[in-house]
Amino acid sequence: MKIVPAIIAATLTTALIITLNTQLPVGGSKTPRLGYFLSPQKGFWKNAEPTDVSFDEDIKLHGLKAGAEVYFDDRLIPHVYAENDYDAYFIQGYLHAKFRLWQMEFETYVAAGRLSEIVGESRLNTDKYFRRLGMVYAAENSLKAAEANADTKNALDAYTAGVNSYINNLNENDIPLEYKLLDYKPEEWTNLKTALFLKFMSFDLSGQGDADLGMTNTKNFFGWDTYKKLFPTVADSLDPIIPKGTVFEKAGINVSFPKSIDSLYFNKTNDIIAAIPPIIPDKDNGSNNWAVAGSKTKSGKPILCNDPHLGLNLPSLWFEMQITTPTYSAYGVSFPGTPAIPIGFNDSCAWGETNAGRDVKDFYEIKFKDSTMQEYWFNNAWVKTQFRREVIKVKGKPDDVELLAMTVFGPVMYDKKFQSNNKDGKYYALRWTAHDASNELLTFYKLNRSKNYLDYVEAISTFECPGQNFVFACNNGDIAIRQQGKFPAKWKRQGDFVMPGTDSSYMWQGFIDIKENPQMTNPARGFVSSANQMSVDSTYPYYLGRNGNFPLYRGIEINKRLSVMNNITPADMEALQTDNYNVFAATAKPVLLKYIDETKLNDKEKKYLNIFKSWNLRADINEQGSTVFKIWWDSVYTEVYADEYSKAKLPMYWPEQSTLLEAVLKDSNYAFADNILTPNKVETLHDVVLTAFQKATKTFTNLEKDNKLEWGKYKDTRVNHLLKLPALSRLHLPIGGGENIINATKSEHGPSWRMVVQLTDKIEAYAVYPGGQSGNPGSKYYDTFIDTWAAGKYYTLLFLKKQEARHNNRIKWHITFING
């Protein structure tokens, strides 16, 4: 009878083995394979890095042309000294992979529409969206352009070889934690993956997702006349990048309106669209940058500043480093996944970017002959459709195949098979400059080597998408800013809504010559700046895009502050970058106090009003007034517009906060203050502001009860892991700032890199980012800089020559790379 216990034991053992090697469903996701994940030899335990870890090493790598030395300072910043450019980019790829492999590969999975391969069918809709957006198609086109240039091909090939050298020598137990959690392994890196990453940045900086669709709904719902009131093209308080009054040259392209514009575009109302993208970029993706001339600085030399505002994630978007070869030496931040230094400085110049916000992404309604989509009507003829086959692999399921219809405009994103939700079966194609062949890497390659203003102009001239405001400063005293991108020449309001695609009359009529792009060099005022505001006033001859793409208030405050500053030091610039003054609130506060009737408030409401009255207009951590203002203003905004939108059944956009503020400053009888749901009463701004405050008081009371009325606790800034895992994130950070503030730190979004560079003979540079150099949550270098960043402090950057690195007391480790 001993065989019975043996059978039972064997059965239990087999079941345990199967269980430990199976991903088990938990809630809406699955566990890792527990046997592998918990394995003492290969599991997550192996990702714990000793606190006294040494990075000293001699490494032999096949593929190097000569060799290189890398010195790591006390913050784990690598200072790479290579004997040629190929080896420099090879080592950059190797180091990116060594410290950020999972992050860089995961982001290319997102861009390529491949998440379903690793997490299953729950992300299939996201994958379909990115395939139909044409991300892979766009990356393929841009890669052709990059590989047609000898310099960028050399950089890409070297970088890819370096990444793969690390992957091919990676021990299974050293595979990053996230691969073990999701139960997959790294694959070979390719140049296409780098192109995909760059296209993902184009997507992330392209504005409010597929806004044309929601804006079409909004225009159809309200009608053209009302829409114009809710969505003006230019804000009254605009302080543009290029100062008002600048005289622009006559347009090189005479843009003409289509003859059918009134009937088929502005006043067309029978074309209702409903589409909600699975991922929508943060509308505040942007940045601040400025450069001040030596005439305004204490040193007599220019100072350049940049702080890009993006999602706050771990691992960080950025990897800090210095790269030195016999032809150049550059320091700054790099993107894990791409070669070069996109934001930084060398021994002569400094550069940085902010998002231009220009509209380069439009939708067109396509008329197909029938549901097979084999032919579409264009310019009085049936045109044969080209198709692109996109195969989406799904973990544990059959492949999903998307046939992407390609038109003269671009891919058809929305059709009967993909979430247009239209009962009439409409088809919408996308025209986006990101689809065009372009070589953005060449810009960074040349900027890293730039020595003067002419080098800077040449470097950025090839940059196409996403459009950027490139700020520049040089140690010879020059400062400049130029908006650069491939910008279509548009008539006013072109592309705000879905356009007819049956002929060429609504197509873009050409691209603006780069000489006509907004630009400014060595202005008399002594500074240049941008903060994502509209770059020019209404006298510029081309349409830039919806007013909502261009935030107003950071630019207003930066220009006001810089205009009165003199004897500026780097410390002054650090203070400005981290300043929490709310200029939007400064404008709105008198309006709210004008219309509130205190006699109708009870004692509790008066208490919160007094907090607001005494508020200093700063969004500092402990300020309760900042919280009261935010909630009260949002309540006013809702009271004004919610009744108008109450009967809307489709996704729509609401007016900008600035639109409401500017409207009530001009008109005390603002028409939208009246609640259309109460036909027997006409509400005024007095009614709206009072009701909004009384409703907001309930929120104030609950927040105070929970000890969350202080701004820092209410805003609750966090730096999330890319997988949104709390245990791998940094939560509840004590930092002020917010929307419309120079320190643009929101809950999950804000300054992703702060940099101040003084271009003295010996470069002085200071910077910080909210993360750490290592992507390994088990390393003490995973989140090293976050507390310093939250406190508004900076690190002094080491920009060293090789012989200096050998003897600097902040250098802690040394790796020698040898060809072998």
Image (cartoon, rainbow, N blue to C red):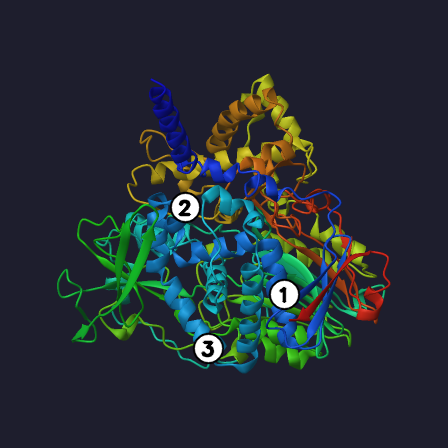
Between residue 46 and residue 670, name the one nearer to us. 46
Q: Secondary structure at mark 2?
A: loop
Between residue 63 and residue 807, name the one nearer to us. 63
Of the numbered discs in the image, which one, if any, rests on residue 531? none
Between residue 298 and residue 339, name the one nearer to us. 339
The residue indicated by pointer 1 is: 92
User: Closer to the N terminus: mark 3 or mark 1?
Assistant: 1
- In the picture shown, does residue 628 fall above or below 559? above
* Image x and y of residue 375, in percent: 17, 69
Q: Is residue 341 visible?
A: no
Can you tell which of label 3 and label 1 is closer to the viewer?
A: 1
Q: CB of mark 3 within 8 Å of CB of mark 1?
A: no
Q: Which residue corresponds to the image point at 45% horizontal and 45% vertical from the top-left? A: 183
Which quadrant is home to the C terminus? Answer: bottom right
Amino acid on which the number 2 mark rests in the picture: Trp
- In the picture shown, does residue 644 fall above or below 402? above
Of the numbered discs in the image, which one, if any, rests on residue 654? 2
Relative to residue 755, is residue 491 drawn left or right? left
Between residue 729 and residue 2, name the one nearer to us. 2
Judge the density around disc 3: few (<14), some (14-19), many (≥20) Cα neighbours within 10 Å. some
Q: Secondary structure at mark 3?
A: helix
Residue 262 occupies which quadrant of the picture? bottom left
Measured Cα–Cα span from mark 2 to mark 3:
39 Å
- In the picture shown, does residue 552 fall above or below 485? above
